[in-house]
Amino acid sequence: MCGIFGLVTVAGHRDDMEITLRRAARSMAHRGPDGEGIWWDDKAGLAHRRLSIIDVEGGRQPMAFLGDRFHICFNGEIYNFRDLRRELEALGHHFRTRSDTEVILAAYAQWGREAPSRLRGIFAFGIWDGEERRLFLARDHFGVKPLLFASGEGWIAFSSELKALLGVAGVSTRVSREGAWEYLAAGYVLGSRTIVADVEKVPAGSWLEWRDGNLTTGEYWDPAEALDEGHGSEASEQALVDEYDEKLRRAVESQLIADVPVGAFLSGGLDSSSVVYHVRRLIGPSVKTFSMGFEEASYNELRYARRAADWLGTDHRSRIAGRGIEDYLHSLASLFDEPLGDTSLVPTHLVATLAREDVKVVLSGDGADECLAGYDTYIADRLQRLYSRLPAFLHDHVLGPVSLLIPPSRRKVSLNYKLRQFVSQARKPFAEAHFGWRGLFDEEQCRRLLHSDLPCNPGLDAVQRHFARVAKHHWLVQCLYVDVKTWLADDILTKVDRATMAVGLEARVPFLDLDLYEFTARLPTGLKLRGLTRKAVLRRAMQGRLPKEILLRRKSGFNSPVSDWLRGPLRAMGEELFKCQSSDLDLDRPLIRKLWSDHLSGAGDHGFKLWALLMLLLWEREVLHRVAIDAHSAVPAL
């Protein structure tokens, strides 16, 4: 894993180019602590921060190919690079290194825009073709690795992180009103948009080409291509379970490739325990596993991680998050680049910090929930289809009012909270209800907070477009597809990348192996959600291999006790940030103060909403103001 940056201009700016490249590389030093490289010519420049995993000595970047025609900046790992290398050698290509980076260059030289579709792995890269004066960008199938860009009259810049782009002259720090709305509604910014108006993301499974100021984009893969509900109907369920298990084993094996130590996150849940089971079988008892807990008893699940580690026989380390959360958040806000309202970012970063003390690479269980219907939201989707048939008066005058009387609980994400959330959304159209299960601020609150006159909810609009693309499929297949395109790509994978790369750690996600995903997508829905049982195929595959308490555990999540923190160690920070006027965001302060007052008094539990606001305001201070101002003061205009 690495940090990448590139800048291409129609007019030459060689003197300014080096300054811009070195500043961008410096801003991403945490992503690549093992080295820095820059290259430029009269039109283009590339900067790279390296975390060396494969071919430690020979894989330095930016890397050239075919003389000086092609130069690349690459972030990620290509798991099938050895197979591709053999194929390319048979086509006449010669290699100087053992790295997957050089294989990408040869693949692009051979197949052009078709090259990304042949790669299996996690990747974001930019290739400059000096002969054709063409820049080519591509991002992996699921969006595991970030790739952002900004462009203007006669120039384009790309990067792994927003902060690096904020230092490029011509990139405004103006907040996107649509992006801010999406963040407040969902806790993250969806799709190709970012929180900054002038910066976009290359979508997952897509490429972008720039030549002489002209942009061309394309999609080389979409999860919808894998959907075929008739597949496997003739095979027995046990045969499908066995095939699924073998594909998971192969996915884990392919992702153990590294020239440095590899470990695994182990929360004690089904997903991470299943990954560790296969890792343990493949590399033996030396495998190192890591988990994180909290002092708050209802949030501390280290006993499950320890039970799984003892059962599987791993070299396990754990740590409990202690005091000092207020000081810790200031640095975390800047490391996360864009604001992220996911409360699990704290334990994810902390367990990444713990793992980095021993290894450079970890495998995680992320992605299983979105492939195998692991969240409570899918049960809510199933129940909503029945609930929506109830008479409106029963919802409006009985169930709705009664749900508001349910007192909040200080336990994790309580049944009380989920029930109130369900009733608040269940009478809405299906797509809107699905989006709303995880929602933060409703449409009225978003309009008020942002003083917005936008004609529609931009996040919901994007979700509805995704639903429309798979409208002919089973309702569960639709929901899983939408969550892969949104929740997984823009929240879960973003969180994991930022948390691990902040400490120079590479995270790999076996459940998102392309072959495994495409097989899973075609499984009968009953092997994903059977009644109220989620991830049925994985539970059956792991029977007898994991303790029963792990196999039968409900989905718990990795949330932080933010409601208690806001009333305790984060109270002073909240008092300060919620009272200060925000120049860039211009949020509605009376509404924020009302939520804050009710939360402190116990009149309501607004922990998730207030946490999202806190992270947004911290981001404005730590990134938008400090980083952007420092960057612009150091970089001459183009």
Image (cartoon, grey):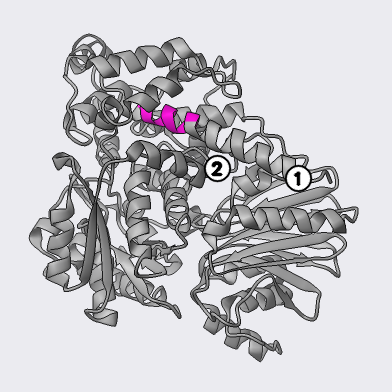
Dominant SS in magenta: helix
The answer to whether residue 138 is above or below residue 338 is: below
The answer to whether residue 427 is above or below residue 415 is: above
Whether tag 1 and tag 2 are in contact, CB under 8 A, the answer is no
Taking the view exactly as shown, the residue that stands out farthest to the right is: 11
Question: Residue 568: x percent and y percent?
Answer: 26, 28
The disc labelled 2 sits on which kind of residue? Gly
For residue 151, the mark is 1
Residue for point 18% across, 59% down: 305
Which residue was labeled with disc 2?
Answer: 191
For residue 566, the mark is none
- Residue 539 is one of the magenta-drawn residues: no
The crowd level at tag 2 (other Cα within 10 Å; few <14, some 14-19, many 20+) is: many
Question: In the structure shown, which secondary structural element does the residue marked by tag 1 occupy?
Answer: strand
- Residue 615 is one of the magenta-drawn residues: yes
Which span of residues is magenta-colored? 609-617
Q: Is residue 472 visible?
A: no
The crowd level at tag 1 (other Cα within 10 Å; few <14, some 14-19, many 20+) is: many
Residue 391 falls in image quadrant: top left
Closer to the N terminus: mark 1 or mark 2? Answer: 1
Question: Residue 397: x percent and y percent?
Answer: 22, 8
Q: Between 39 and 528, which is closer to the camera in this rendering? A: 39
Q: Between 391 and 46, which is closer to the camera in this rendering? A: 46
**Image side of residue 42 versus residue 151, left or right:** right
Disc nearest the viewer among 1 and 2? 1
Task: Count every numbered label the image shows and give the total.
Answer: 2
The disc labelled 1 sits on which kind of residue? Ser
**Image side of residue 365 versus residue 122, left or right:** left
The answer to whether residue 83 is above or below residue 346 is: below
Residue for point 43% across, 20% down: 578
Residue for point 14% across, 41% down: 297
Question: In the structure shown, which secondary structural element does the residue marked by tag 2 occupy?
Answer: loop
